[in-house]
Amino acid sequence: MGYTEVVSSVVEKHGWGIFYLHPYDVLSKVVKEFYAHITSLNNAFIYVCCALVLFDKDSINAQYGLSKGPDEHADFVKAMSPECLVQVLVDVCIEGTQWSISRINCDTIDRISLKPQCKIWYHFLKTHLIPSTPNATICKDRLLLLHSIIVGRKINVGKIIFCEIRRCAQRLLAH
């Protein structure tokens, strides 16, 4: 299966036609507006592009035409076991990849350990779902999300984006 088929099959599994094809430059401008105008983590609305925008998980999903449904990814993470972690490595990494412990005591892998088709989806994950600048290692949470993307588990995209914006805003507001 070529890369085009790998990408289109995952987009179809998740119903991400609009979300995946959304222009990155527009997405990044909107996200920057969210960060710039969040003054409290309790705001229900945020001023973005000259308009008040409802800021919650469902509104983010609606923006991308994503349906509400079961969050199979969250269930997968809650039920995680050592055996499942090994299977995640088998599914998304090249043979012989092992978990490492980072300086901040997180399970990680080296990014270069990803299988080629998984590298495409990891790039998507770090540009559209959970922005990231460090590129050499991948933490366990991101790898589990990548695995859910690859195997087609239902994912609440709005929840992931909402939580990431709040997490980053929380750090900014703390300073």
Image: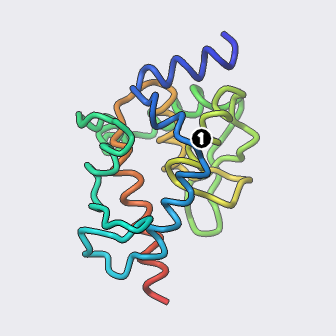
Image position of 78 (left or right of 6): left
Secondary structure at numbered mark 1: helix
Q: Residue furthest bottom?
A: 175
Residue visible at 59% across and 49% down in the picture? 126
Q: Which colour scheme is used?
A: rainbow
How many marks on residues? 1
Closest to the observer, 26 or 143: 26
Furthest toward the top, the residue is 1
Using the image, determine if residue 163 lies above or below residue 85: below
Q: Residue at x 46, y 28 (%)?
A: 17
Which residue sits at x=45%, y=33%? 18
* Residue 10 shown left or right of residue 39 in the figure: right
Location of residue 84 in the rendering, given as x and y in whole percent from the top left corner: 44, 33
Q: Which amino acid does label 1 sit on?
A: Phe
Q: Where is residue 24 in the image (x, y as percent from the top left)?
A: 59, 47
Front-lying residue, 153 or 102: 153
Residue marked by disc 1: 124
> Is residue 15 shown above or below 102?
above
Residue 46 horizontal/vertical position (percent) = 33, 70
Residue shown at 28% from the left, 51% from the top: 59
Q: Where is residue 40 in the image (x, y as percent from the top left)?
A: 32, 80
Residue 123 placement, left or right of 32: right
Q: Which of the two residues, 97 or 25, is positioned nearer the viewer here? A: 25
Q: Is residue 76 above or below residue 57?
A: above
Q: In which quarter of the image is residue 173?
A: bottom left
Number of residues whose C-alpha sits closer than 10 Å to that of mark 1, classed few (under 14), some (14–19) or many (20 or more): some
Relative to 19, does residue 104 appear above or below in the rendering?
below
Q: In this view, does 80 lie to the left or right of 127?
A: left
Quadrant of the frame with the N terminus: top right
**Among all residues in the image, which is located at the extreme front?**
50
